[in-house]
Amino acid sequence: MATIGFIGLGNMGAPMAANLVKAGEAVAAFDVTAAAMQAAAQSGVPIATNAAATAANADVVITMLPGGQEVLAVWREVLPAAKAGTLFIDCSTIDVKSARAAHALAAARGVASLDAPVSGGVGGARAATLTFMVGGAAEAFARGKPVLERMGKRIVHCGAAGNGQVAKICNNLMLGTSMIAVSEAFVLGEKLGLSHQALFDVASASSGQCWSLTSYCPVPGPVPASPANNEYKAGFTAALMLKDLKLAKAAADSVGAQTALGGHAADIYQSFAERGEAAKDFSAIINFVREQSKGR
């Protein structure tokens, strides 16, 4: 078993760290928020005195943080405390430039590193069923995979440093735009007298089939486990979807890629968030689509 330092005990990080403990790993965790550390401790996660202390005896250090600025700041603080041979894994969703800069910081210290953002939301973090999209050297991936398997069920090596983040933003570019398209279809069906179930029965077995429809349907009924059946309590918030769509737009702009639909999806989620709905599940975007369609 590995000794693991874990930094970042938010909605995703806390259950991920708890799953490592349940799997028998020796964990030392830290967060800048005292309440987050207290909650994690109640789940059996051992707490370190500070961020650097998590790396003092660690074989692996995992970070799960809000953005690229935070990741770079923490890695700069913690890397000097790490022993030779430590593997650093960042599971945050951040911009590609910052991810590659983090790899460079690790390389300058002679430390192996991976970027490994996740898909699966809070439910996947709790159930240890996350998908990890991993960028970094093959040797580092081989070392990191057994640890990631404690927290997820699908671990995919996407190539060189930063490519895990590339895969994540490309995936969520598709997800965010498809959820809006599915929502528009349901609202159109409503206004023309088609029941939700009838549309679902047709589209889920036809060419309109997609994950946003069959696994995360934005209307109550057809998919009992979807947030639509729980007042859109977030598995993945609209705020996080907006963040990822903005990351995709920034990455696209940096290489001259055309992402017109993704850019428009970001604008729609921005308007939704500005109406005070950012904390709801991103599938609640159907309510915004429905509202915009009133009286027409």
Image: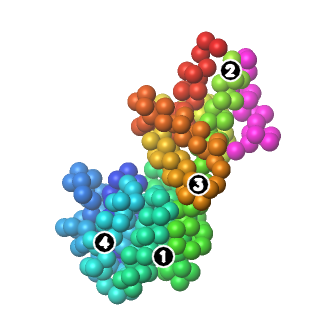
Q: Which residue is rendered at x = 27% and y = 71% of the image?
A: 77
Q: 13 or 164: which is nearer to us?
A: 164
Q: Which amino acid does label 1 sit on?
A: Gly
Extreme residue in the top direction: 295
Please state the extent of the stretch shown in magenta in the rendering: 192-210
Residue sitting at x 54%, y 26%: 287
- Assign a secondary structure to mark 1: helix
Location of mark 2 (residue): 190
Alpha-carbon neighbours of circle 2 within 10 Å: few (<14), some, or many (≥20)? Answer: some
Label 3 SS? helix
Q: Could you tell whether 19 is left or right of 7 in the image?
A: right
Image position, residue 113 (x, y; %) = 45, 76
Q: Mark 1 points at which residue?
A: 144
Residue denoted by label 3: 252
Q: Residue at x 74, y 42 (%)?
A: 209
In the rendered view, would you say 279 is above or below 259? above
Looking at the image, do the residues carrying marks 1 and 3 touch, with CB atoms under 8 Å apart?
no
Mark 1–mark 2 Cα distance, whole angstroms, equals: 48 Å
Real-space Cα distance between discs 2 and 4? 53 Å
Q: Residue 200's quadrant in the figure?
A: top right
Residue 205 among those drawn in magenta: yes
With 142 as the anchor, is 14 left or right in this view?
left
Question: Colour scheme in the image?
Answer: rainbow
- CB-based contact (under 8 Å), mark 1 and mark 4: no
Q: Can residue 42 be seen in this view?
A: no
